[in-house]
Image: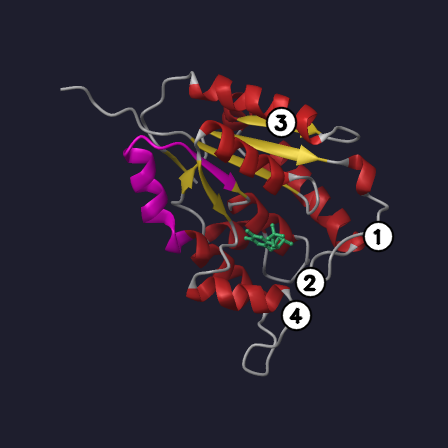
Amino acid sequence: MVETKRGKLILIEGLDRTGKTTQCELISKRNNYKYYKFPNRETPIGKIINSYLSQQNYDGKTLSDQSIHLLFSSNRWELQEEIKQNLLDGKNIILDRYVYSGVAYSLAKGIEGMDYEWCFGCDRGLVKPDLTIFLINTGNADNDGFGDEIYEKKEIQAKVRQVFETIFTEKEKKEYIKDHFKQLDVTGLGIEEVYEKVESFVKEETNKDSNRFMYF
Ligand code: TMP
C-alpha cells in the first residue's frame, strides 16, 4: 500500500505591511496551497480578537494583555486539528502569521511576568512549520501609513521587529534556523520579485522528503 505523503506546512511571518498576505494568497492560488491566516477573525474567539485589535471595548472593558495573548494562542489551537488533518491528507498549507507573531507582539509590550517562556508556553505542542519565511522591510520604518489597529504604530512595530530578531537569532533552536528558516529582505522589491524568491524557497522545501511532524 502506498502511504500518502503528508503535505508541507509553510509559514510567512513578519511585521505589519511587509506583504505577507499578498504572498500567501499568491502561493495559495498559483500552487494550490490551503491558506490559513492568523488571527482567524471568523471563529468565536477570532471575533473577540477582532474587536480588541480594532479597539472596540469587549463587554465595556478592555481585555488584559494576558487574556488577549491567550486568545490569540487559543485561536491557533481552534484550528489545529483541521490543519493537521489537511497535512495528513497530503494537502500543502501556507500560514499567514502563527506562533512567532504571538510571542513577538506580546513580548514587545514589556509586561511584567509576560516573559518569553510565559508567552511561548501556551503554544507549545502546536505543529511546527516545515519552513518559516520571515519578511523584513527596512524601507517602511519611518512610514506613518499604518492602519488604525491597536499595534499599527511606528514605536510598537520597532519593538516587535527587535523581538522577532531576538527570537530568530537567540531563542529558536539553531538546527531549526539552519534547515527550516529563511529571512527575506523585501525592501524596494515589487510583488512579483518577492514572489519569485518566496516561491523558490517553497519549491525547495516541497522537494524535500519529511513525513514526521515537528512541534513547538
Ligand atoms: P493581521 O494584520 O495580520 O491580521 O494581524 C493582526 C494583528 O495581530 C497584527 O498587528 C499582529 C497581531 N498578532 C498578535 O498580536 N498575536 C498573534 O498571535 C497574531 C497571530 C497576531
Q: CA gap, disc 4 to disc 2?
A: 6 Å
Q: What residue does disc 2 label?
A: 150
Q: What residue does disc 4 label?
A: 55
| Circles 4 and 2 in contact, beta carbons < 8 Å | yes
Q: Could you say whether the residue bearing mark 1 is in a helix, strand or loop?
A: loop
Q: Position of residue 90 (x, y in %)?
A: 31, 30
Locate the N terminus by quadrant: top left
Q: Nearer the viewer, residue 168 or 26?
A: 26
Kindly identify the amino acid type of the residue bearing the numbered disc 2. Answer: Ile
Q: Which one is earlier in the sequence, the residue at label 2 or at label 1?
A: 1
Q: CA gap, disc 2 to disc 1?
A: 14 Å
Whether 79 is among the magenta residues is yes
Is 135 above or below relative to 78? above
Q: Position of residue 177 (x, y in %)?
A: 55, 27
CA neighbours of label 2 inside 10 A, class few (<14), some (14 to 19), many (20+): few
Q: CA gap, disc 4 to disc 3?
A: 33 Å
Whether 67 is among the magenta residues is no
CA neighbours of label 3 inside 10 A, class few (<14), some (14 to 19), many (20+): some
Q: CA gap, disc 3 to disc 1?
A: 25 Å
Q: Could you say whether the residue bearing mark 4 is in a helix, strand or loop?
A: loop
Q: Which mark is residue 195?
A: 3
Q: Position of residue 140 (x, y in %)?
A: 81, 42
Q: Residue at x 63, y 74 (%)?
A: 56
- State which region is magenta: 77-95
Kindly identify the amino acid type of the residue bearing the numbered disc 1. Answer: Asp
Q: Which mark is residue 144?
A: 1
The single residue placed furthest to the left in the displayed view is 1
Q: Could you say whether the residue bearing mark 2 is in a helix, strand or loop?
A: loop
Locate the C terminus by quadrant: top left
Q: Residue at x 28, y 34 (%)?
A: 89
Q: Which one is earlier in the sequence, the residue at label 4 or at label 1?
A: 4
